[in-house]
Each structure stands twice: as structure tokens, then as C-alpha cells.
Amino acid sequence: MKCHVPGPNVKVLARTVHTLARFGDELYLESLPDCILLRTLNAAESAYAMIKFNKNFFSYFNYNYYSTEDNEGLKCKISMKSALNAFKSPAHIDKQVESLEMKLDLESCKLIFCLKCKHGIVKTHFVSILDCKAMQAVYTKDTVPNRITSPQRILNETLNSFQTSDDQVTLEATTKSLVIKNYIDSNMDLTKIIRTHVSLDPAEFDNYIIGEETTITFTLKEFRALLAFAEALNLPLQLHFETTGRPAVFIVHNGTTFEAHFVLATSKPDNATQATSTQSTTTKERNKRKDTCNTQGSVKKKRHIDVEFSKCLEEDSHLFNFVDIPDDINLKASNNLDNVKEQIDFDNVIPASPTSRTKIKSVFKRCFESTFDPKSIQGVILAENSDSE
């Protein structure tokens, strides 16, 4: 295989490699008589991507340049990291690279990427071939009952409402609306997560055909990757899907030079389990509220004053200069304390006690008196004058 890619198309090829790197760690390359296929598969085998570059995408194309058999093209598997090293900065690569040459070196079993940059600079990357085999996924896209064609801007704005921690997204397709919401696992704590629910009207899409209403769930990471690819190329996104459990196919193409297929595995959310978990969580919250109310009520009932001023004064009277308190004041204080207890039990309010103020005044009586009275020392010589020399 040997082909030349012109400068404007090098940017498209670079974005393609970076998009495939968000799906899998290995890149499968296959050359056919009329196109070149790039494929990858994620580790969980739940997302598959295939991008086809037609013959008119290249300025020069020979699919079996080094092959002795007429019908045999290149089939190889290379590391995705090695391919990324050859296509750095895809947003600005067209400003530096004038053309790209891809070819296979039979002697060293390496795939060569030769980038011819401006000012006569040539960058050559030798990528080792890991295996000589191709990969093919089996799926259908033409006979499915549900087809949606959407501008990538609408779906990108919709995904901006979702959290970065969301792993999966659920699509509920009906004839009246398309609902996109984050998938909630039944094992999650519903009180610690954010629910996102976006409803789109069919009039917002370029084409909206729902032959069978269904609900599907797929991974959000790969969905964001393919939307970023469609946004970079400013192309609409086509969604072909059937019922739950069948793969959903996302298609991005410009009609002439390339076509990209992104196949995502789907699953059905367990609504019954989620409803049960929601009810159990609600019941737990109600029980917690009841326990909290009972605890507060018991605390309120136990609130009372256990301080006996007379006992405290008997034990610690030496701290207050042995102030004598009459018995009638103690009786009044005890009666007032009983009244305060009753008010606390029934009104839950602690009123100010005038008796306590009287006690404090009597206890701290010396504190309120003047410590120095100039009148008390009139005519009294406290210290004689020192002898004058």
C-alpha cells in the first residue's frame, strides 16, 4: 500500500486518529481497492469505531503497491500511541504539513508516515506492525426502525448539562419527544447524586423517524468522543438504533470522501429496581426524620435546671467572703425554681429569674463596692515625708 494525502485532508486524518484513540488502544488498518479502513475496539468490547476514507480522499492511491497478488491489500494492527505520535496537534497540523505519504516497508515490517512540512522539513515516523490481521464488526444500520439526524450543536449543548462523573446516558425515544437523561444505578445512593433530564422536541432535528418506541442506555465517554469528532468537522450526526440490547450506530460523513461509523452497545435500565431503591430510600429518610423528632422531643422533656443554689453556696461559700443568706431568701429561691421548672416543661422557655439576681448581688456584694474612697483617709497620714537633704 502506498498513498498520498493532501494538506487539507491531513487535518481530517489527524482528528480521526485522535478520535479513535478515545475508543481503543490498537489501530487496525486495511487497504481495499477503493478505500482505506481504520478500525478500533475498546477494552470492554462495548464500543467499536470504523472510519472509511474513499479513493478520492487521496491525491495518489495504490492499495497493493508492494503486493504480488492483485487482490491482496494491506492488513495490519499497530499501536495507537505510535499513531498519535505521528499526528500531534491536529488543530494546527494543516498549517505546518503540506502533504503526507503512507507506505509499507516490507523489509522492516513497519508502516511509514512521512510528513512533508513547510520550509523543506520532512518528518518520518516508523511504526512497528504488531499483527497482520483485520477486524470486522457485524451490525445493521439500513433496516432499523428508528432514525434520527441531528445537528451536532444540539447534542453538544445537551451533554453540557451532564456531570463529568456520569458514565452512561439513557435515551427514551418516542414519537413526541426524545428524552436524554443520566443513568442511575440501583446501587447508588440517590441522596448523593444529581439527576439530569433533558427533553428535545422532534422539530429540533433534521430528520426524526421513530418506528418503535424504546429506551436504550450506552456509555457516555464514547458518545462525547464521536460528538467532538462531528463538531470538529462541522457535520451532522445520524443515529440508527433498534430496541434495547441491539447496538446503536452513529454515522458521520460528508458524502464524498469519508464516512465514520461508531457502534455502541446498549442496555436497558432497571426501572423497577430503581423505583424500589427510591422508595426504600424515601422510607429511610422518613424513619430518620421520625427518630430525629422523637430524640428532640425527649431532649426537650429532659431539659431542667439541676442547680441548687443553697447547696452550692454551702460548699463554696468561702469563695464569696462568707456572705450570709437568710433562710427566707432560700425558700423564695426554691419556690421560684419550681416555677421556672414548670414553665420550662410547658412553655420550653427559660425566663429571667429575679431571685438569682438578688443572690448574685449578695454573693458578689464586695465586687460592686468602691475599692478606694478618698474621704475615708482625710486627716490620716499614710506615709510621712522623707527627710530633705
Image: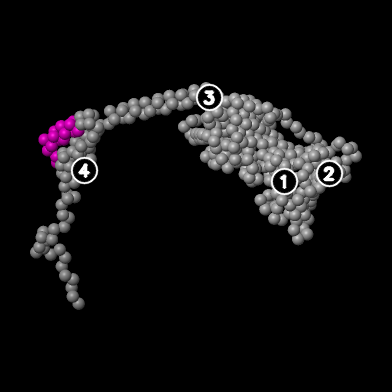
Q: CA distance from mark 4 to mark 2?
A: 110 Å
What amino acid does circle 4 point to? His
Residue at 16% in and 65% down: 383
Q: Which residue is the site of mark 1?
A: 13
Toward which corner of the image does residue 152 lie, by quadrant? top right
Q: CA distance from mark 2 to mark 3?
A: 53 Å
Q: Which residue is the site of mark 3?
A: 271
Residue at 70% in and 53% down: 94
Of the pair 65 and 337, the residue shown nearer to us = 65
Quarter of the picture holding the N terminus: top right
Q: Which residue is the site of mark 4?
A: 318
Would you say 115 lies left or right of 216 here? right
- Packing grade of label 3 (10 A; few <14, some 14-19, many >=20) is few
Would you say 228 lies left or right of 363 here? right
Callout in the foreground (4, 3)? 3
Q: Which mark is residue 62?
A: 2
Give the structural element (helix, strand or loop) at label 1: helix
